[in-house]
Amino acid sequence: MRIRIVFGLKNRGAYVPFHHQFLLAQTIKGLIILGGKKEYATYTAFNFSGLKGQIKISRKGLHFFSSKVTLVFSAADKVFIDYFLEVLFAQRELMIGNLNLVPEAMEPEEPVVIADSMKFLCISPVVLLPASFNDETGKRFISPEQDEFSDLLYDSTIQRLEESGKYTPAQVAGFYKFQIVPDKDYIQRIQDSHKKFARIYPLFDADIKYEVRGYTFPFTLYAPQPVQQFIYENGLGLYCHKGFGMLDVAGQDTSKREQDMELNYA
């Protein structure tokens, strides 16, 4: 289930860092704990985007000038989403970076038809490799055209499918088809304009700062429909509960969405 949370912005022109997923992750974790339900204290089966609105970029980060700011939030467990929303809307306001936000509304995302072949856009960076303290391994670059790129994402997806408990071993064993084909034209356009589709991003765990490499580019995924549906609802790759790996389905407004993606993450 994917929803769009709408906030009112009380201080237009305020900003958040260029990549602010870690701030959102800290806030979301705090709200989950604040609600008091122990069964969700270590819950990680959710995913979210960055903040969206009318923005301008400066050296400080992303300045928001719209009266409304939105956040896409997703989880397969509706009971958890209802719990999270109850806690969220009990707050009079939230501070995310320098943004003073007031929770106002929730809107369900429009349903999409998921098939065995889907073109996705990254609306938050996809992480392939785990981070480790004082180690550069998690920042290694892997070309999206290499088999290793798809293999790593396949391994993490299968592990999460198994951990969800919603699929039998026989079903999981049948999910062997998995191939990511990057949009070569987009990647070439990014490179020609001297931008990047792979960057280093901060990630915090237990108050320790790590760094990981995240990728943002359109791609076509060939995989069984249940796997595609799981990824659409739960994200792709590692650290999805920290705001990485959220995807959107490419549609008629693909050009605009890709331009937004370049602006926010390239």
Image (spheres, rainbow, N blue to C red):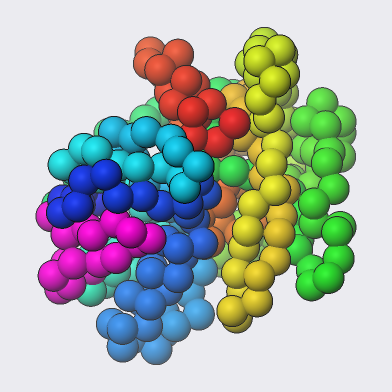
Identify the residue at horizontal 38%, vertical 60% (top origin). 97
* x and y, in percent, of residue 243 in the image: 50, 55
> What is the number of callouts on the image?
0
Mark yes or no: residue 99 visible.
yes
63, above or below 159, in the image: above
In the image, taking residue 1 as reference, residue 183 lies left or right, namely right
- Residue interval drawn in magenta: 88-104
Q: Quadrant of residue 63?
A: top left
* x and y, in percent, of residue 104 in the image: 13, 55
Residue at the far front: name it: 59
Mark yes or no: residue 232 visible.
no
* x and y, in percent, of residue 59 in the image: 50, 42
Identify the residue at horizontal 51%, vertical 68% (top origin). 44
Identify the residue at horizontal 59%, vertical 31% (top origin). 266
190, above or below 59, in the image: above
Identify the residue at horizontal 59%, vertical 79% (top origin). 207
* x and y, in percent, of residue 24 in the image: 42, 61
Residue 169 magenta-highlighted: no
Q: Nearer the viewer, residue 56 or 254?
A: 56
60, above or below 95, in the image: above
Q: Quadrant of residue 251?
A: top left
Q: Nearer the viewer, residue 79 or 14?
A: 14
In the image, taking residue 266 as reference, residue 7 lies left or right, namely left
Residue 100 magenta-highlighted: yes
